[in-house]
Amino acid sequence: MNNRIIAGLVVLFALFVAVSSSFFTVDMTQQAIVLQFGEPKRQISEPGLYFKIPMVQNVVYVDKRVLNVDAPAEELIAADQKRVVIDAFARWRIVDPLRYYQRLRTEDIARRQLATFISSTLRDVVGREPLTALLLDPRAEGHAGGRRAELMRNISQLVNDKAKENGLEIVDVRIRRADLPEANSQAIFQRMRTERDQEAKLIRATGQEAAQKRRAEADREATVIIANARRDSEMKRGEGDAEASRIFADAFGSDPKFFAFYRSMQAYREALSDKTTTMVLSPNSDFFRFLDNVAGAMAPAPAAR
């Protein structure tokens, strides 16, 4: 009895496994290839639930979304013999799952092959174009920079022609970065720096020349102003001295005695202000006439004995 139950359970389990392995689902982002002993039997591109023969057939899923591939950055030579480092990428998808599976099998192999296609195509196209066609703004008009979009379309078409053989379709190829090699960039940077230094020196020299000119003009104007001020001051001083002389003359003429007294007082103040001064004069000297008598009359000399 127990053996029959176990056998029944085994049969049920086998049936469950067989039924469950007979169905498979295809997602919206996938395509499927049904293989029977390694030989393709059918392709499925629509999402849904599908049937396959268990233990005989197996399913390989292929992505149907737009995928990316990055080409390695390479140093290429343009038509004008100038070097440029280009870093490009492409967007692609699988349009023929069977051919893709037969030729490439995996996405890694497909990416490596597409990277090779992109590199070789870039080398061919860039070798026929000047460097400005890749470096200048693609929206520019009137020069080679306006051809960049056209060049990218040509590259996409050439790569797509090669990719079709493997069931792939190139949606777009773009250049992520197009730069000069490091050595060239350093040389250009150094040249630009030298030019800016020369420009700065020229500007400084022009500024110093203008400053010297302004300084010379200011010094000349200051000299003229000082000279005019000294002339005016000398004129004013002369006028003042003349006026003082006139006043003194008028004062002397109106009262000669007071004028003599005033001038003697000034002389006393100037001569006797220093206590260390020693003066040897005769008592009858005219210098001391106002010390004994305010009127200025000299005392009679003593009689000789």
Image: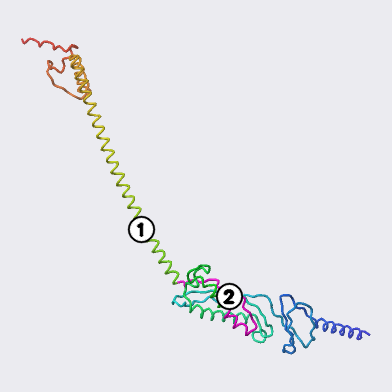
| Residue at image mark 1 | 202
Mark 2, other Cα within 10 Å: few <14 / some 14–19 / many ≥20: many
Instruction: Tell me the kind of residue under disc 1.
Output: Leu
What is the three-letter code of the residue carrying label 2? Val
- In reply to whether residue 179 is colored magenta, the answer given is yes
Q: In front here: 299 or 236?
A: 236
The residue located at (13%, 20%) in the rendering is 281
Residue 173 disc label: 2
* Residue 101 drawn in magenta: no
Extent of the magenta region: 157-182
**Residue 59, x across and y down, in percent:** 74, 83
- The secondary structure type at the circle numbered 2 is strand
Query: How far apart are the alpha carbons under marks 2 and 1?
Result: 47 Å
Q: Residue at x 71, y 75 (%)?
A: 29
| Dot label at residue 228 | none
Q: Height in image: 161 above or below 224?
A: below
> Where, by quadrant of the figure, is residue 71 drawn?
bottom right
Residue 120, above or below 297 = below
Quarter of the picture containing the C terminus is top left
